[in-house]
């Protein structure tokens, strides 16, 4: 069943997944938390990994102005988030959002901390389902905090991309926000391709000559498309705001966000297209089911007409009247049987020719 993995849950859905890379990368993982100190001047210097919440907070307090810390949490408990919230200046409502992981895509600003909620998606091939999780991004004066719930962890892939692009990393915390968004939206594009492949297969089955009832599969795929739309559609205005001049980002960052905004818009268009196509497939299948029922009724009516004719003749000759035609004739009975067989054969040929049988 598709849905969001709750905070603290370590369960993983069965089956091979697509959309986001699931491995954690080369950066070490420390008790569900990892913090990497970056220089935001574009220097290729390797990041410094800091372990433990106390060490993280101390290192952030002592960090010079040209550095920022990126704290990454995966399926954290409420205690892990609250341990950082006070020192980082996170609003209680933001902490609640990060722990509960049931937010629609949105952006909020609490003082000097920007909070962005995203839905992460991944595709399970064995069940053709779109599973969802959540990623929260907090941008502060000298830190970025990402909190991920579910199997898809965009922060790990975003860290690998930033390590390969020092020029983008020179933008500071904004670069982390852009890269996480980019990873999530790339997953949307991949999932749209998978869902379209499933839809194409359903279309072939609906319009094939075989009688196959696929209405349950159509509804199942429609649920997956709706989950896809719930993740993409609310994100469109959020990313558009980031791509505009009023976002407050450096001028060099705006082209990156415009690129992500374009990808999100295309993903939203694809989601709408898939939803409309599914509605058309459902209508076509229901019309085909109606055609099957009409064919069945015609077949039943044709056989009823064939059997009604001999029944009529037999009923007439079964009446107990003294003066009935051909009652005294030797060949009267064989003639009545011959008329019945001939009439039934003629009706059968007519119905077959018209496609009723």
Image: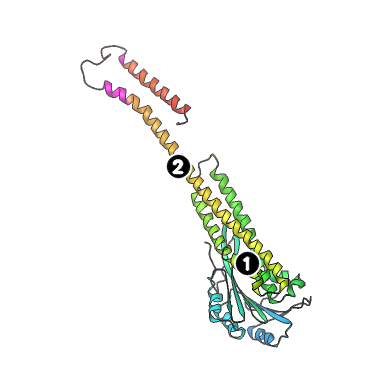
Q: Residues within 10 Å of mark 2 (few under 14, many from 20)?
A: few
Place residue 344 in its image quadrant.
top left
Residue 50 at what x, y percent from top left?
69, 81
Q: Secondary structure at mark 2?
A: helix
Main secondary structure found in the magenta portion: loop
Residue 350 at what x, y percent from top left?
44, 25
Residue 330 among magenta residues: yes
> Which residue is found at the position 54% from the left and 61% from the top?
227
Spatial CA distance of label 2 from label 1 is: 45 Å
Q: Secondary structure at mark 1?
A: helix
User: Looking at the image, can residue 149 be seen?
Assistant: no
> Which residue is found at the position 55% from the left and 51% from the top?
277
Front residue of 197/344: it is 197
Give the extent of the magenta segment.
311-332
Q: Is residue 143 above or below residue 211?
A: below
Residue that label 2 marks: 290
Front residue of 226/155: it is 226
Q: Considering the image in quadrants, where does the C terminus appear?
A: top left
> Which residue is found at the position 71% from the left and 85% from the top?
63
């Amino acid at each position: 069943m598709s849905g969001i993995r709750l905070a603290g849950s370590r369960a993983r859905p069965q089956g091979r997944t697509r959309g986001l890379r699931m491995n954690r990368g080369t950066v070490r993982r420390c008790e569900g938390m990892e913090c990497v100190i970056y220089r935001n001047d574009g220097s290729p210097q390797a990041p410094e990994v800091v372990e433990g919440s106390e060490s993280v907070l101390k290192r952030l307090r002592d960090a010079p102005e040209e550095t920022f810390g990126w704290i990454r949490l995966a399926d954290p408990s409420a205690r892990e988030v609250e341990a950082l919230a006070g020192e980082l200046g996170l609003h209680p409502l933001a902490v609640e959002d990060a722990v509960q992981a049931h937010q629609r895509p949105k952006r909020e600003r609490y003082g000097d901390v920007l909070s962005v909620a995203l839905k992460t998606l991944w595709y399970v091939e064995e069940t053709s389902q779109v599973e969802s999780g959540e990623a929260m991004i907090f941008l502060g004066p000298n830190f970025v905090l990402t909190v991920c719930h579910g199997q898809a962890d965009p922060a790990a892939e975003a860290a690998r991309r930033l390590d390969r692009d020092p020029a983008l990393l020179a933008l500071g915390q904004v670069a982390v926000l852009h890269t996480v968004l980019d990873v999530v939206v790339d997953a949307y594009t991949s999932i749209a391709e998978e869902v379209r492949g499933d839809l194409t297969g359903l279309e072939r089955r609906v319009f094939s000559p075989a009688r196959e009832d696929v209405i349950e599969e159509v509804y199942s795929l429609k649920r997956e498309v709706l989950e896809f739309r719930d993740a993409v559609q609310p994100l469109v205005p959020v990313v558009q705001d980031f791509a505009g001049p009023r976002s407050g980002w450096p001028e060099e960052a705006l082209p990156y966000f415009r690129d992500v905004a374009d990808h999100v818009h295309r993903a939203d268009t694809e989601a709408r297209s898939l939803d409309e196509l599914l509605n058309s497939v459902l209508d076509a299948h229901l019309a085909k089911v109606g055609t099957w029922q009409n064919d069945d009724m015609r077949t039943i009516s044709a056989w009823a007409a064939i059997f009604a004719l001999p029944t009529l003749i037999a009923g007439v000759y079964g009446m107990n009247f003294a003066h009935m035609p051909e009652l005294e004739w030797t060949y009267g009975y064989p003639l009545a049987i011959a008329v019945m067989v001939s009439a039934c054969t003629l009706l059968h040929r007519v119905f077959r020719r018209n496609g009723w049988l």
